[in-house]
Image (cartoon, rainbow, N blue to C red):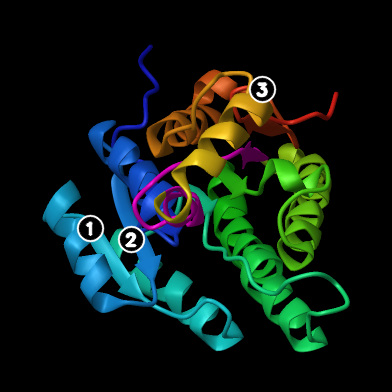
Amino acid sequence: MKLNLENKRVLITGGSKGIGKSIAKVFYEEGAKVGICGRNRDDLELAREEIGQDLAIFEADITDERKRVQLIDSFIMQFGSLDILVNNAGGSSGSTIMETDISLFHKAMELNYYSAVHLSQLSAEIMKQQGSGAIINISSIFGRESGGKPTYNNSKSAMISFTKAMGDELIKDGIRVNGVAPGAILHPSGNWQKRLDDNPEKIAEFVDKEIPGGRFGTTDEVANAVVFLASEKASWIVGATINVDGGQSKSNF
């Protein structure tokens, strides 16, 4: 399927590792002009070496509101405009609700949710001027059901709700907002790889019991869904968050 993404200008947060790096790679292979954002310069440089030397890299901490504005300004200065934003940056912290300090809930919302809201607002203003654009938010199946750490689940649940609300609001301006909710995805820098290394038997039991597909998902499988949603082939998908989980989610919705 030809997705017609050649020369589309794409910004991906958290793009130096894992899912974000795979998203960048697939867009790049489709002929898009791709920029990735991350906090670690060395990781960004390594991603560029792997993907291609004309991959643009932006070092920024997107939990800082001023840095988010600077990121969008820097991207526009380099590429002229912005066609696709992928809000991928995120992380998990804390423990049970009662054992987690309230400050970690604030930090989780800032990284996983508020950064995406603000970057989406900034990007949508640019996209409105050209009458088109796509925003893809990476949430999680645990944004719909219990599992994982509460700080993470809460922020990803908010992301799913935000995606629907903004999708409905902006479609009249030619901007589509959608999301992808990955299940358990295995990659070298991820938590599942650490758990697998620590206790392979326990993780094998988890996969057998919890994932109907019988294996972990791959970052490329998430990336392929993201790129499709960002393309004109998904023109009538608005405000949706699509599970990419091998059947892991127990939710009907």
Is disc 3 placed on a helix, strand or loop?
loop
Which numbered marker is on residue 247? 3
Q: Is residue 148 left or right of residue 196?
A: right
Whether residue 190 appears in magenta in the rendering, the answer is yes
Image mark count: 3
Q: Amino acid at mark 1?
A: Ala
**Type of residue at label 2?**
Ser
Amino acid type shown at disc 3: Gly
Expressed as whole percent of the image width and height from the top left, the position of residue 123 reads 57, 60
Mark 2, residue position: 16
Q: Quadrant of residue 205?
A: top right
On the image, which quarter does residue 116 sit in? bottom right
89 or 229: nearer the viewer: 89
Magenta part of the protein: which range? 174-196
Nearest the viewer among 99 and 112 is 99
Q: Nearer the viewer, mark 1 or mark 3?
A: 3
Residue 170 visible to the viewer: no
Q: Identify the residue shown where x is 57% and y is 63%.
A: 90
The dot on residue 47 is 1
Task: Give the residue displayed 37% in from the left and 58% down from the top.
Answer: 189
Q: What label sits on residue 92 in the rendered view? A: none
Residue 135, horizontal then vertical, whole percent: 59, 47
Residue 153's place in the image compared with 224, above or below, is below
